[in-house]
Amino acid sequence: MESPKQKVEGDGRKTLRRFMKRELIDPTDQPLRVRIVAKPQPDGGEHIGTEDSLKPEAELFDDTNNGNGAPCGTYISRRSRGVDYSTSGGGSVEEVMDVNSELLSQESLVFRKLFKETKTALLKEPPTIQIEASEEHAFVALLEFICFSRMPPPSYEECVDLLMTAEEFQVLSCAYRCTNQLLRKLNSALSCFELCHKLRWPKVKELLAMEAMNFVTQTDNTELRVPKQKEDHDIMSIKNELLQQPFSIIKALFCMDYLKVESEDDVYDFILCWAQTHYPKPEDHCTAKELHLERLIRFTYLTCRKLEDALQCDFFHPESVSEAVMEALAFKVREPYRRRLPPGGCSSNRFLERCYKRVPVAVNRLWFPEFDRCEVYFSLAISELLDMHYSLGRRESEDFQFGPQLLSLVASYKEVRRTFYFDLSITSKGEILDENVHATRFMAMTNVGDSAEFVEMGTGTFVPAKQETAGGLDLLPGFLLQLLNGVCPFILDGFLHLLVEITCKR
């Protein structure tokens, strides 16, 4: 693809004028001024919308305002801000075209606001869009998409530019089409994660990230031209491909909140493996520390064993990782059943869960002279409970250690004679080592008087060595019907909070 500078010198305003000569399908009802300003381009040429990508995210998406200091009835694109049209030289030009304002307003939030503002202020001059010269091709491609619902097969670079323009002018339908085009271009699916960091509109940012995630985890990379569904939808199913990627893509990917992984321990193991692959020599570890790889890990959802390992890891910045571990431990000792935070429950993504296959648990270990006891807090969101029902699946907790034995909690629905029952059980994992009898108490939180308390719902026993499973069928009588009707007394702030108490004689 030609660089923006080459386009300016070679094309003049031919692209826009060629579009203006075309006969539009929808009748026109509004003049629109397009102001194209020229400014010097950096060597090598950059693509649209990349200039401000390092700004804090809170400052990024302010483009529903008409640019920075733009007069009423004018929208100034990000790239052309700071350029004065009256002094921008002979390469700048204005063109006035007739458009269908209703069509543009339906597709674009920016055009909708601009036309509304012009009408409200009773302006005599037509609404104005100011763009930089290198944006002309992508802007005209956006107009063609809106007016003719067509998008010629673009190159990767052209598709990126069009996506950035659709994102700036808030045309979701075009952004969706660009996303599909990008994902189906060979070797570009993984680069979409890096591209997410240059996007500002949350809808488009999330759309591209989710579509890219689904594509790379559900498509056989050896048959990209003929997508083949894979059974494993975990991001680690493409671990070998990811290990070869540069840090920019790894950073973009593991900063995502909706990353699909088994547990945060898997993220920790992968980051360590990536560092060992790219920085194998001890003398290279200082370079790895400068990347601050620890910032890609949600320490609050690591198991205690991984937290201990992190403090000794030579790839992490010592001060930064120490602070992260202390922060995680402080988070873990708060009210255990509140370890899972509702959306908007925290200000930092360090405390946000990813899309874990295994539900995080909090484990309190209690020591008594004659027996050991642990309390395992296990919470499920309403969305997880509904998904379990409609897919007849189950949710496993992250593994936890009790004595010599590795255990896991499993929640599921079981259908017996057309009736669904909520089941919570304990299963042994790994090597079976413990032959002692374990006593269990199953509790659920509900409102008792003016406060929320855990109430006992069932008891049981199991012996790990006999591969027994402890649990309660129909642990919460009538739970599913109450949940579907929105009247379940065990749902508090969008979560079902469960507590399992496990006791074993010494």
Image (cartoon, grey):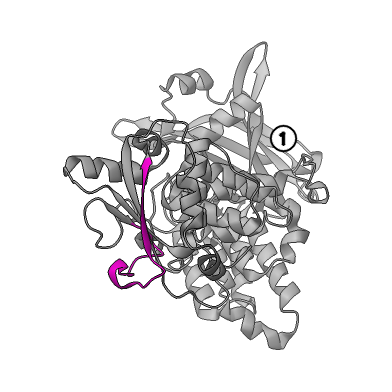
Q: Looking at the image, which residue is at 65% across and 44% down?
A: 214
Q: Looking at the image, which residue is at 78% across and 47% down?
A: 224
Q: Quadrant of the N terminus?
A: bottom right
Indicate left or right for 188 with 198 as reference. Answer: right
Residue 242, position in %: x, y? 72, 61
> Is residue 398 visible to us here?
no
Q: Is residue 286 above or below residue 96?
A: below
Q: Residues within 10 Å of mark 1 (few under 14, many from 20)?
A: some
Residue 43, position in %: x, y? 55, 78
Indicate left or right for 255 with 128 as reference. Answer: right
- Name the outermost residue toward the front: 21
Image-quadrant location for residue 366: bottom right
Three-letter code, disc 1: Thr
Of the pair 116 and 331, the residue shown nearer to us: 116
In this picture, which residue range is highlighted in magenta? 76-98
**Residue to which mark 1 is pinned:** 469
Of the pair 458 and 218, the residue shown nearer to us: 218
Image-quadrant location for residue 469: top right
Of the pair 66 and 495, the residue shown nearer to us: 66
Disc 1 on helix, strand or loop? loop
Residue 115 falls within the magenta-colored stretch: no
Residue 347, position in %: x, y? 38, 57
Image-quadrant location for residue 35: bottom left
Q: Is residue 146 above or below residue 361?
A: above
